[in-house]
């Protein structure tokens, strides 16, 4: 099975689907003033393969007052790594741990590792949807109460 069929399979055969709209991301964007409506920012399709989960994140292209669309981001309550594989689009994986902040420019088909104890989020800096496959421990328990210190804006 190639990675294109993996994407299509996850979009049809999943155990859980999460849709995240702008209002669900309160506090994530620097400025949400003057924004009409409540657009879908991203969707996640999760397939369970105990003891790991596969997730397909589809992050729409766009910006909120010039700040690129991004995922909420999280850190794992249970220390465990997470792997990201860019399938389509153009994006950045932001990881941080206390004062350490790293920007990983994702390359199609390459694996990016989020080490244990690092908070992380995806940012779509392209003009098309970003699709990323994630691989993580099913018991990792995400904590979404993370304050990210780096932001990405359209020029």
Image: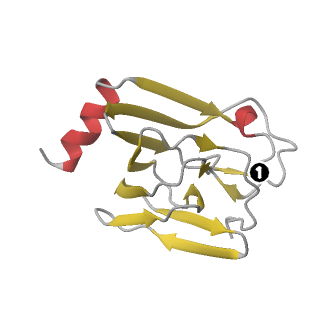
Left or right of residue 97, residue 92 in this image? left
**Residue at the limit of the structure toward the left, as seen here:** 1
| Element class at badge 1 | loop
Which residue lies under the disc numbered 1?
29
Above or below 142: residue 148: below
The residue under the point 72% across, 70% down is 98
Q: How is the image coloured?
A: secondary structure
Left or right of residue 49, residue 62 in this image? right
The quarter of the displayed image where residue 22 is located: top right
Left or right of residue 78, residue 113 in this image? left
Q: Quadrant of the N terminus?
A: top left
Rendered location of residue 12, percent (x, y): 30, 25
How many marks the image carries: the answer is: 1
Q: Quadrant of the C terminus?
A: bottom right
The residue under the point 50% across, 60% down is 126
**Residue at the limit of the structure toward the front, as seen here:** 78
The residue under the point 50% across, 44% down is 140
**Residue at the limit of the structure toward the right, as seen here:** 33
Rendered location of residue 101, percent (x, y): 65, 74
The residue under the point 43% across, 67% down is 106
Rendered location of residue 68, percent (x, y): 65, 56
Rendered location of residue 50, percent (x, y): 31, 34
Q: Nearer the viewer, residue 83 or 37?
A: 83
Q: What is the crowding at mark 1: few (fewer than 14 residues within 10 Å), some, or many (at least 20)? A: some
Q: Nearer the viewer, residue 29 or 141?
A: 141
């Amino acid at each position: 099975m190639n990675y294109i069929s993996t994407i299509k399979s996850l979009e049809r055969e999943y155990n859980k689907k999460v849709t995240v709209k702008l209002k669900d991301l309160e506090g994530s964007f620097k400025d949400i003033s003057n924004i009409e409506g409540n657009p879908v920012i991203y969707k996640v399709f999760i397939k369970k393969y105990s003891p790991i989960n596969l997730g397909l994140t589809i992050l729409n292209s766009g910006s909120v007052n010039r700040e690129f669309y991004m995922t909420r981001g999280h850190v794992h309550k249970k220390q465990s790594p997470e792997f990201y594989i860019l399938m389509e689009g153009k994006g950045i994986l932001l990881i941080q741990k206390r004062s350490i902040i790293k920007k990983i420019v994702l390359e199609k088909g390459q694996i990016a590792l989020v080490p244990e104890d690092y908070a992380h989020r995806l940012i779509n800096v392209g003009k098309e949807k970003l699709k990323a496959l994630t691989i993580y421990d099913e018991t990792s328990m995400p904590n979404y109460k993370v304050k990210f210190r780096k932001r990405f804006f359209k020029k």
